[in-house]
Image: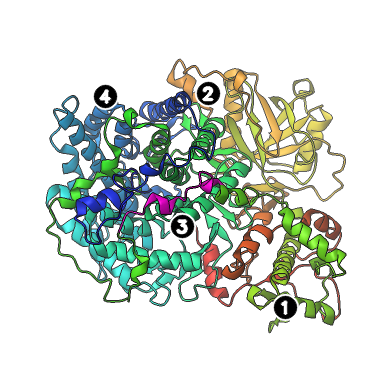
Amino acid sequence: MSAAGGGRGCGSPVPQRAPWSLVAATAAFCLVSATSVWTAGAAPMSREEKQKLGNQVLEMFDHAYGNYMEHAYPADELMPLTCRGRVRGQEPSRGDVDDALGKFSLTLIDSLDTLVVLNKTKEFEEAVRKVLRDVNLDNDVVVSVFETNIRVLGGLLGGHSLAIMLKEKGEYMQWYNDELLQMAKQLGYKLLPAFNTTSGLPYPRINLKFGIRKPEARTGTETDTCTACAGTLILEFAALSRFTGATIFEEYARKALDFLWEKRQRSSNLVGVTINIHTGDWVRKDSGVGAGIDSYYEYLLKAYVLLGDDSFLERFNTHYDAIMRYISQPPLLLDVHIHKPMLNARTWMDALLAFFPGLQVLKGDIRPAIETHEMLYQVIKKHNFLPEAFTTDFRVHWAQHPLRPEFAESTYFLYKATGDPYYLEVGKTLIENLNKYARVPCGFAAMKDVRTGSHEDRMDSFFLAEMFKYLYLLFADKEDIIFDIEDYIFTTEAHLLPLWLSTTNQNISKKNTTSEYTELDDSNFDWTCPNTQILFPNDPLYAQSIREPLKNVVDKSCPRGIIRVREESFRSGAKPPLRARDFMATNPEHLEILKKMGVSLIHLKDGRVQLVQHAVQAASSIDAEDGLRFMQEMIELSSQQQKEQQLPPRAVQIVSHPFFGRVVLTAGPAQFGLDLSKHKETRGFVASSKPYNGCSELTNPEAVMGKIALIQRGQCMFAEKARNIQNAGAIGGIVIDDNEGSSSDTAPLFQMAGDGKDTDDIQIPMLFLFSKEGSIILDAIREYEEVEVLLSDKAKDRDPDLETEEPPSSENDSQNQSAEQIVSSSQEVGLVDQESPEESSPNSHPESSSPADTDIAAGVSPSEQNSNPAENHETTSLDGECTDLDNQLQEQSETEEDSNPNISWGKKGQPIDAILADWNEDIEAFEMMEKDEL
């Protein structure tokens, strides 16, 4: 989500008030000239290998785009597991995610300029004709103003930009007469009623047909919007004004940006995540660079690049200084409170912040960009994809991955800035992971859970609009692209807008509200293109030297240097640090040690005790490190019982022809039978039991002998079903929900509990599938008869030698190959089901990841669990998580623990079963934040 790279004359400064054409060519596009600096930093990639990888990206795009056109068009998006289109209202609602769908062939419009970048000009011309012929923008559908702007309006403008470019070249699009631009103008006017607020901030949603009129519109009553939603309009709206001469669009977008700037927190110069569109009050007062704010910062810098308005650069630099002062804790980027910016607001990061290194490249701040990008890459190498959210100790917080392109984007810009072939290898890894784990017969499926490898039946339009564009450009040489990419700027959806718009139709009244509200430090503002000798010292290993200390940032082991310091300290007679398992609240010596480590005790009115650590109050940096480790151990101890009680989801993987492991279904585990996390997976063919409910002795034991039995939920206990199929010789069992239409897409998974008796006699693995997932296996049996599955704790790598990539002979074959692969839950299994006839569906539980991966709990602010103080951020991020807790936790496992971490401590001395780690004073804010979703 950043500007296109490349530049001219980047080695010399530009005058502070240079003509805009020169500023555009330098201040934002000073990346490519450095590409020769890093050839010694890593083994260069040959031209042949780059071409091979580029061709691979083209083939992947064809696979995704071709299946969308074949199985989904004119629907908005492809459902790659069931090989059909996603139509608003015909599928179960996914909440706000569906607000991007407007029955306007979203994926096709979003992919228009990608076709040109990938040199598919004939396909582009055909796609434009389809858009003009088939797309209707006057549907009675409520859509997101933000998503419609960046995807549809941006897609139409990007398509128009490249259509006129191709027409000028004289070979393609000779018939084109600004039809896409007219559609964009029509859509722009449909979005304008959303700005009918006192503040000028737009409503978050609008009805394409009825605007915000009630009751027909079914919208217009909202009071809040996110900062990015209101602040990510200026590029598309200004481009529409510059293209058409209708100034109203740029004026409305500028007014919204002006209002956000005026409402920033003046002392910290930060903005919150959510704002009231009528009063301007901040509703969510946490601030970061990820979800809810991200593209607001991006569009300030790019508005300066595209429009040449100095006030946008001044605002961006003011915000950037605050970001680097408060939010940046290299290599981490942690949310803070806008009123208390030294106070971290959470201990996890979301995947959307992966765009930020790319934005830092455009800013010219390369070192932190390299650091954060490398940290993200280490997380990807651990989980294959970037989880939707992960903790400061790099564990999964939210396990989904909807094939987001932000990391690929930053990889592209870092390569353009440094020329370091290391980033080509990073891109190669992304390609391999997409093909290995996300590719399915009908496209590419989002990951529902990066831990199990299960899929979700979605392929968002941004996957085609951005991912393939950045990956192709990463490996492409200049001659591989049919136009000069350096003449364009990328929007946040990677749509291309021409830089010549900066000098076109400049009849916009500009209100500079920047200097009116802040005294600016001139030293913070870079009006010149940074000289590459400043950006990149004459050391070809510079980028590598920045990355190297972060190679083990995700690993569990401590850096050797710190271990050595500790060993020497112990040998010299110093006492080993206090361990959480040994701590006694009434021991004066222990309390003194806590004080030395910067940890203080707070006695609450209800009798509970909270621990708070401030590293700056520790006696030394070593003591601060000990305090951080002590707090982490307390957190681990408090969640241990939940770890033991809650089992993670399991995987059912269809491995027989024609699936070959591509279909992965998330299954609920059982609290009895073979534990798949401790034993080798179970593999076998499936067979239905008779009776199907498995509640009595099987009448077809010969059919299930040596196979995995399929049984239906209901009419008896799960354990009884397990015993009956085990007695018949089955090697495993899959219970399929009897509630028709149930799916992990809409219901949380749960554990199958025993029957209250001793279940040690059950020796086979038992897993649970909802009806929709179970029907995939049943349909496969009807089609192929012999269906083999793998029951495991995590999906296994597919064997490429067994796979056939031949296209299906018919649409039905294709659908059978996909076998309605289903959405699977990313949540840890938290519900327990014992009964069957009466309990046809599990009770819901809050969305969360596994106890091992979540923040501390209600009443506990997780904000500074692993983060804090900037004065000691390196020790915190790299060393604070180094204690090997596995052995400690095993020793502690025999100690009873209260599942509620808010433990009341008795007046008598006793070991702590669990304890809260409250890291700030703003508990109410955190309770609200815990409920928020990306």
Are the residues flagged by discs 1 and 2 in contact, CB closer than 8 Å? no
Are the residues flagged by discs 3 and 2 in contact, CB closer than 8 Å? no
CA gap between label 1 and label 2 equals 57 Å
Q: Which amino acid does label 2 sit on?
A: Gln
Q: Residue placed at 35% from the left, 37% from the top?
A: 107
Q: Which of 904 and 216 is in front in this view?
A: 904
Mark 3 / mark 2, whichever is N-terminal: 3
Q: What residue type is labelled 3?
A: Gly
Where residue 293 sits in the image (x, y, percent)?
41, 60
- Which numbered mark, 3 or 2, is in the foreground of this view? 3
Residue picked out by circle 2: 817
Are the residues flagged by discs 1 and 4 in contact, CB closer than 8 Å? no
Residue picked out by circle 1: 609
Using a 10 Å C-alpha cutoff, classify the residue at mark 4 as few (fewer than 14 neighbours), some (14 to 19) or many (20 or more): few
In the picture, measured across the screen, residue 322 lies left or right of residue 218, that is right
Are the residues flagged by discs 4 and 3 in contact, CB closer than 8 Å? no
Residue picked out by circle 4: 122
Q: Nearer the viewer, residue 739 or 791?
A: 791
Using a 10 Å C-alpha cutoff, classify the residue at mark 2 as few (fewer than 14 neighbours), some (14 to 19) or many (20 or more): many
Evaluate whether residue 87 shows in this view: yes
Give the total number of marks visible in the rendering. 4
Where residue 184 sits in the image (x, y, percent)?
21, 45
Q: What stretch is highlighted in magenta?
A: 528-544
